[in-house]
Image: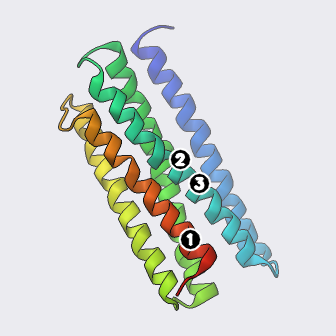
Amino acid sequence: MVGPEASAAAGRKARRRAYTAIAALLFCVVLVFWWRPASLDLWIKAAHVVAVISWMAGLLYLPRLFIYHTDAEIGSVQSETFKVMEERLLKVIMCPAMMISWVLGLWLAYSSFAFSGGWLWAKIAAVVALTAIHVRFLKAWKSFAADRREHTARYWRIMNEGPTLLMIAIVILVIVKPF
C-alpha cells in the first residue's frame, strides 16, 4: 500500500500496539495493588519512572519535529509526514505517559512523603511547568496540523531547552532533596 491508506493502516497498528502497552502497564499496576507486596511503593515508583521517561522522551523530541516541520513546505510529503509523527507522538505516547506520571507521582507524594518537604513542592511546581510546556506543544501541534506556522525554527530550538532544564531541576530535587 502507498499513500494515505497505508499511513492510516500503519497509524492504527501503531496506536493498537501503544494502547496494548499502556493496558499492560495498567494491568501490572492493578495486579501490584491487588497483590499488595511489602514493597508496593517501590513498584509504583518503578512504574512512575517508566512513565516519566516516556513523557520526557516526547517532550525532548517533539520540538525537534517542530523545527523540521517549520522548514518543510506546506502541503509537501515531508510536512504531511511530520503531521502524522507529531500526532502519534502526542496521542499515543506523551499524553498517556503524562497522565500516568501525574497519577503515580501524586500517589507517591501522598504515601511516601505526606506532601511534606520543600523539595517536594518545588518538584511539583516544576512538573506543573512541564505540563504547561506539554499544553503549549499541544496547541502548536494543532497549528501545524492546520498548516499554520506561528513560530520560527529558532523559536522551537529555544523551546527545546525548557523541558531539559526542568528535567535537570527535578532530578536534583528528587535525588539531593536540598530543602
* Circle 3 residues within 10 Å: few <14, some 14–19, many ≥20: some
* Circle 2 residues within 10 Å: few <14, some 14–19, many ≥20: some
How far from the left and from the top, in percent, is residue 15? 53, 36
Mark 2: secondary structure: helix
Mark 1: secondary structure: helix
Q: In this view, does 90 lie above or below 71?
A: below
Residue hosting label 2: 57
Name the residue: 63% across, 62% down: 49
Residue hosting label 3: 53
Name the residue: 52% across, 90% down: 117
Distance of mark 2 from mark 1, alpha carbons?
Answer: 18 Å
Labelled disc at residue 172 = 1
Marks 2 and 3: CB-CB under 8 Å? yes
Q: Nearer the viewer, mark 1 or mark 3?
A: 1
How far from the left and from the top, in percent, is residue 124? 45, 75
Q: Nearer the viewer, residue 105 or 59?
A: 59
Q: Is residue 48 above or below residue 150?
A: below
Distance of mark 1 from mark 3, alpha carbons?
Answer: 16 Å
The amino acid type found where label 3 is placed reads Ile
How far from the left and from the top, in percent, is residue 106? 52, 77
Marks 2 and 1: CB-CB under 8 Å? no
Q: Which of marks 2 and 1 is in front?
A: 1
